[in-house]
Amino acid sequence: MKLSEVAQKLGCRLEGPPELEIRGVAGIEHAEAGQITFLANRRYFPLLKTTRASAVLVEDGITLGREAALPALAALRSGNPYLAFAQAIELFHQSPGYAPGIHPTAIIAKSARIGEGAHLGPYCYVDEDVEIGHHAVLHSFVTIYRGAKIGNDFFAHAHAVVREYCRIGNRVILQNGVIIGGDGSCGAGRRRRGASQFLRGSGHHRRNANRPGHQVGRPGARWPRICNRRKHIAVRPGRTSRLDQSRR
């Protein structure tokens, strides 16, 4: 990707050759030619002289001094270099692709409905009356209980579980071992919503322990607002991450 294109997508002011080819991002100490790095902490200012990166995300007013033997360093001026670097990572990160299909060891109930382009990995189990939208990925050992309704672009990592009659929206990603509805409080007729969010679980199930989805559907509970962008919800041991059922 051309440096000028990167600058445009990140909303940065470019100081340097616009035709410079950029192929990735890296930290300031490990970056190589063809990569972008960033400087958000001024104590790393001396590393600007020695980094081998081709461009750096920096605030206005910072002078890019260089050792004589090293090539010039292009600057992408940003009010928040740290945020801009996070956005740059997304530009160059390529998620692994999963070919549509159902693994021979997966078990799919006859009444289950799976959308187009779905990938169901080894030893997945989809129960009766389940509905899963388009382009879903169930990695391996994923269990979807009876009557669950799941939207499009769903991704469940290994050993994730969605319990009976739960409702999950579009673009939800369940990390390894996450259990949605693990306390059984999401019964028939109750709805559970997920809108463009990540759930990060502890990776294990303990009886009566708090976990992603725990207590969803309980009257009087307080629910966090879910925005229309993907975000991470970090769940610490002994704490609860709940899906929003009060907003449509």
Image: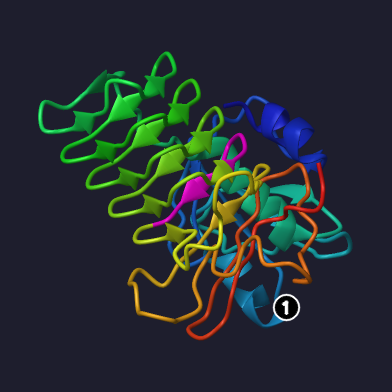
Point out the residue furthest to the bottom here: 238
Label 1: how many Cα within 10 Å (few below 14, some 14–19, many 20+): few
Q: Residue 244 in magenta?
A: no
Between 28 and 48, the one nearer to me in the picture: 28
| Residue 239, horizontal then vertical, whole percent | 57, 81
Tell me if residue 226 comes above or below residue 109 in the rendering: below
Tell me if residue 170 comes above or below residue 74 in the rendering: above
| Residue 96, horizontal then vertical, whole percent | 35, 34
Protein image colouring: rainbow
**Which portion, as a residue range, is magenta?**
168-175
Task: Please tell me which residue is depicted at 29% across the width and 41% down the height of the picture.
Answer: 139
Tell me if residue 210 comes above or below residue 98 in the rendering: below
| Quadrant of the image occupied by residue 46 | bottom right
Please state, as top left, top right, bottom left or bottom right, where the N terminus lies in the image: top right
Between 126 and 8, the one nearer to me in the picture: 126
Task: Please tell me which residue is depicted at 65% across the width and 54% down the height of the picture.
Answer: 231
**Where is mark 1, residue-wise?**
42
Point out the residue furthest to the front here: 188
| Residue 6, horizontal then vertical, whole percent | 68, 34
| Residue 87, horizontal then vertical, whole percent | 66, 47
Point out the residue furthest to the top here: 116
* Three-letter code, disc 1: Arg
Taking the image as shown, residue 121 lies to the left or right of residue 198, namely: left
Q: Residue 172 in magenta?
A: yes
